[in-house]
């Protein structure tokens, strides 16, 4: 195939030109039979660089373009847009990565220049074989599903609904609110968490375009970007929300009243039928089927039924399944905290006065199990409290990453404990992570309040008579420490939410090495997943504080809104296709496809759903007969590239 090509080499400032001989590359490229023009430019992605390419397309009748620059992931859309503006099919562009794969990897000029020529030459060979691909567009369903009813999900739902989009807000628990609902105050301003959150919860429940589905979870998803059919299962509450007046009489008379409260992190009891917490939305009682005697044993005098004047309790309620048709999905399922029982040296679960920070948070709350009083298990006020940072974080045995929020929430709790007790406050840290607005000032305030800071990680917590002994090392002074306290608070790591892996499987969204949802690009596309139309925000994507979570939720909503408002989306044309004459019907391609795009038709031959296909090539790699190929990545194209890369002659 003969095609008139233009070759353009970018200096990328000095990133490429500082190592690679760009003049030499252009001179060599000019001698290739397909090349009609070869040039280099300091910044091809600039307006001047784009204009240079457009001018050559017009004047020299170019039918394809090869760009030697940075990673295609960075600027391939930029140069495809240039071709399209010049009237050339955008898929007749080929890029050679001369920065990440050459100049950054080979500091020696001669070696880098030789490799750059091989890369550029192979790109020209590939560009000569590319064929124009046509855009495909599909309509978008103008509604969105938000999974997770914490502050991230609430913010994203309100932003979408305020813009006129229909929203389904899905929450696995019996109430909206998430982790923020468990907090007493928020750092660094120490303002009331409930005062911030509760109005937003009420607002989202009243919004005419938002349907709140509590006690619900995703069990599967079909379809493709812009037209997803999500299967949702809703567990029975056994209380009719439209009839319940939230009087609480049912909980008062329930025969089972000593169940450890999940909301209070096990520090206080709840009944088998209960309202999750005072500000719950919906403010409706819920029956725990695992502890209700009528459900588990079929035997109970059912005093709750007699106490409910409105007749809201209904044990005939059953699980419901429904299918939601949506165009976009925002994942906002939050996080869970590390279980310190996995680190027995801290004494959690062994000593009753060793608490997690979230348990201590519930103790600080006026609506918590102690009414806001800081007390030991025997009801006495502690004389000394130790706060231990990085329990499960920055630890290669558990989680190597920093959980970001732990430093500040332990400082907040230390300050509040100092205000509410006469206890001596000790804080053991590795490094103080005061990354946010006002956080460094918050740290300075804590120091001025008399908190004793020790730079060093606790090695063990042991019993010392009726007190606890914290064994640690002061790394600044280089000496061991033994500190007697009455209570120890553990700053536990932030972990991916339970069920995140199953949710990722349902929407075919990849997870990172730590189990959080993976973003499409950490800098340029931080709230988008690699799957079109699926967005991930808040702590399900990685540890972050409330301001960052809210900001990211609004960013995710804005991206989803732009996606939905377009009315239709363009699908990548470089997808797989099957040659029925070569297919032997083994089905290996079906197993290899992670997107459900490949199936066996009625005749037993492979078929590809172009709307679902991402062009990853997994099916091609598994195909034994060569029946499957990816457009513009066919075997012949790749082999021609390899031949040029492995040619013996050197520049």
Image (spheres, grey):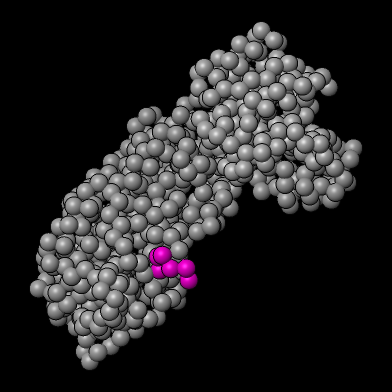
Q: Quadrant of the N terminus?
A: top right
- In the displayed structure image, the side of residue 208 where residue 228 appears, left or right: right
The residue located at (26%, 58%) in the rendering is 408
- Position of 589 with respect to 440 (left or right) is right
Q: Position of residue 496 (x, y in %)?
A: 45, 58
* Residue positioned 47% across, 61% down in the render: 498
Q: Residue at x 62, y 34 (%)?
A: 20
Above or below 428: residue 208: above
Q: Position of residue 2 (x, y in %)?
A: 82, 19
Residue 103 highlighted magenta (yes or no): no
Asked whether residue 601 is in view, the answer is no
**x and y, in percent, of residue 552 in the image:** 38, 42
Q: Looking at the image, which residue sits at the far top?
A: 59
Q: Nearer the viewer, residue 440 or 12?
A: 12
Point out the stretch of residues depicted in magenta: 392-397
Instruction: Give the quarter of the figure containing the C terminus.
Output: top right
Residue 438: image location, x then y, percent: 21, 48
């Amino acid at each position: 195939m003969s095609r008139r090509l233009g070759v353009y080499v970018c200096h990328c400032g000095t990133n490429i030109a500082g190592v690679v001989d760009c003049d030499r590359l252009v001179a060599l490229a000019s001698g290739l039979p397909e090349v009609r023009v070869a040039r280099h430019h300091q910044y091809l992605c600039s307006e001047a660089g784009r204009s240079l390419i457009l001018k050559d397309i017009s004047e020299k009748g170019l039918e394809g373009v090869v760009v030697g620059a940075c990673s295609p992931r960075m600027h391939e859309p930029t140069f495809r847009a240039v071709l399209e503006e010049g009237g050339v099919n955008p898929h007749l562009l080929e890029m050679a990565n001369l920065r990440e794969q050459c100049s950054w990897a080979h500091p020696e000029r001669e070696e880098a220049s030789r490799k750059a020529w091989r890369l550029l030459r192979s790109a020209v060979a590939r560009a000569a074989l590319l064929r124009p691909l046509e855009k495909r567009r599909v309509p978008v369903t103008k509604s969105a599903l938000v999974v997770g009813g914490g502050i991230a999900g609430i913010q994203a739902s309100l932003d979408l609904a305020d813009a006129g989009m229909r929203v389904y807000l899905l929450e696995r628990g019996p109430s909206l609110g998430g982790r923020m609902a468990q907090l007493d105050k928020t750092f660094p301003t120490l303002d009331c968490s409930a005062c911030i959150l509760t109005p937003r919860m009420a607002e989202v429940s009243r919004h005419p375009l938002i349907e709140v589905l509590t006690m619900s979870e995703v069990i599967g998803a079909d379809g493709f970007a812009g037209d997803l059919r999500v299967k949702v299962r809703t567990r029975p509450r056994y209380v009719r929300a439209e009839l319940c007046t939230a009087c609480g009489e049912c909980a008062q008379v329930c025969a089972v009243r000593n169940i450890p409260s999940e909301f209070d992190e096990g520090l206080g009891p709840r009944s088998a039928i209960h309202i999750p917490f005072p500000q719950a939305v919906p403010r409706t009682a819920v029956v725990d089927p695992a502890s209700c005697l009528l459900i588990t044993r079929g035997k109970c005098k059912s005093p709750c039924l007699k106490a409910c004047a409105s007749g809201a309790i209904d044990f005939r309620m059953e699980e419901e399944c429904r299918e939601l048709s949506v165009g976009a999905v925002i994942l906002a399922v939050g996080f869970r905290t590390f279980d310190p029982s996995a680190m027995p040296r801290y004494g959690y679960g062994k000593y009753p006065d060793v608490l997690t920070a979230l348990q201590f948070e519930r103790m600080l709350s006026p609506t918590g199990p102690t009414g806001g009083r800081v007390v030991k298990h025997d009801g006495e006020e502690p004389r000394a409290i130790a706060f231990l940072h990085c329990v499960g974080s920055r630890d290669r045995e558990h989680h190597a990453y920093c959980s970001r929020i732990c430093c500040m929430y332990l400082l907040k709790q230390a300050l509040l404990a100092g205000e509410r007790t006469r206890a001596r406050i000790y804080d053991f840290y590795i490094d103080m992570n005061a990354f946010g607005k006002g956080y460094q000032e918050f740290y300075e305030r804590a120091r001025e309040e008399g908190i004793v800071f020790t730079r060093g990680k606790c090695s063990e917590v042991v019993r010392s008579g009726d007190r606890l002994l914290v064994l640690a090392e002061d790394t600044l002074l280089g000496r061991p420490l033994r500190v007697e306290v009455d209570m120890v608070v553990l700053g536990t790591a932030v972990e991916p939410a339970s069920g995140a892996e199953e949710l990722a499987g349902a929407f075919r969204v990849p997870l990172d090495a730590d189990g959080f949802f993976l973003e499409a690009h950490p800098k340029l596309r931080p709230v988008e997943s690699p799957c079109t139309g699926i967005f991930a925000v808040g702590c399900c994507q990685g540890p972050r504080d409330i301001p960052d979570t809210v900001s990211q939720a609004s960013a995710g909503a804005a991206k989803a809104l732009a996606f939905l408002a377009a009315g239709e989306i363009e699908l990548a044309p470089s997808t797989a296709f099957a040659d029925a004459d070569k297919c032997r019907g083994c089905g290996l391609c079906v197993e290899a496809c992670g997107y459900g795009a490949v199936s066996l038709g009625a005749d037993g031959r492979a078929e590809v759903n172009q709307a679902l296909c991402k062009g990853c090539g997994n099916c091609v790699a598994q195909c034994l007969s060569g029946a499957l190929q990816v457009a513009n990545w066919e075997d012949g194209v790749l082999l021609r590239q390899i031949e040029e890369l492995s040619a013996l002659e050197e520049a």
